[in-house]
Image: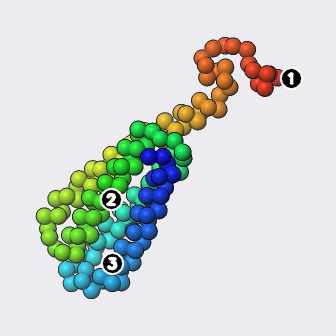
Amino acid sequence: MTGWGWVRIAAVLGFLGVGVGAFGAHGLKDRLDALGTAATYQTGVQYHMYHALALLALGVMAGPSRTTAGSVAGWAFLVGVILFSGSLYVLSLTGIKWLGAITPFGGVAMLIGWAALAVAAGSAAAGRADAARPAHARAGTAAEPVASERVQ
């Protein structure tokens, strides 16, 4: 997926994060308070939004290009939000404790996403630095500069 695809997914995740957070703070407040799970729900919302923003950063950094590290980061963030935040949402609303066993898998996916984002950022920076060098320097030769690069 290109970076702009990740921007679209980030926008949807951000939209859903705001909606889920507002619904939890207002429509579900009494239920979450009765179950004593408001903090768990809030943690799910926070990590949901953090990773929507991480996907946005990934998409903007990648732009129209596709990289393996960028794809790994994007999918890991998305899976992480679904497993981590999703399990916390359901756990906090239902009280089904075994759902807490799913949450760490989402956390690991998020960690993989951050590591892959670091690799993708390094690759993007290296690619931009290489593109900024004159054509003869990129080729690895000491060839004569092209006319546009000659000092007059």
Judging from the image, the colouring scheme is: rainbow
Report, in whole angstroms, how far the alpha carbon at label 3 lies from the one at label 1: 67 Å
- On screen, 21 above or below 73? below
Nearer-N-terminus badge (3/1): 3
Neighbour tally class for label 1: few under 14, some 14-19, many 20 plus, Cα within 10 Å: few
> Contact (CB < 8 A) between labels 2 and 3?
no
The residue singled out by tag 3 in the image is 24
Say which quadrant the C terminus sits in: top right
> Contact (CB < 8 A) between labels 3 and 1?
no
Q: Residue 75, can we see it?
A: yes
The residue singled out by tag 1 in the image is 152
Which three-letter amino acid code belongs to the residue tagged 1? Answer: Gln
Q: Residue 102 appears at what percent x and percent y?
A: 19, 58
Which three-letter amino acid code belongs to the residue tagged 3? Answer: Gly
Residue in the image at 23% along x and 59% along y: 103
Q: Quadrant of residue 116?
A: top left
Q: Quadrant of residue 83?
A: bottom left
The residue singled out by tag 2 in the image is 81
**Disc 2 element:** helix
In the picture as drawn, the residue positioned furthest to the bottom comes out as: 30
> Contact (CB < 8 A) between labels 2 and 1?
no
Left or right: residue 148 versus residue 48 is right
Neighbour tally class for label 2: few under 14, some 14-19, many 20 plus, Cα within 10 Å: many
Nearer-N-terminus badge (2/1): 2
Q: Residue 137 appears at what percent x and percent y?
A: 64, 21
Report, in whole angstroms, how far the alpha carbon at label 2 lies from the one at label 3: 17 Å
Report, in whole angstroms, how far the alpha carbon at label 2 lies from the one at label 1: 57 Å
Which three-letter amino acid code belongs to the residue tagged 2? Answer: Val
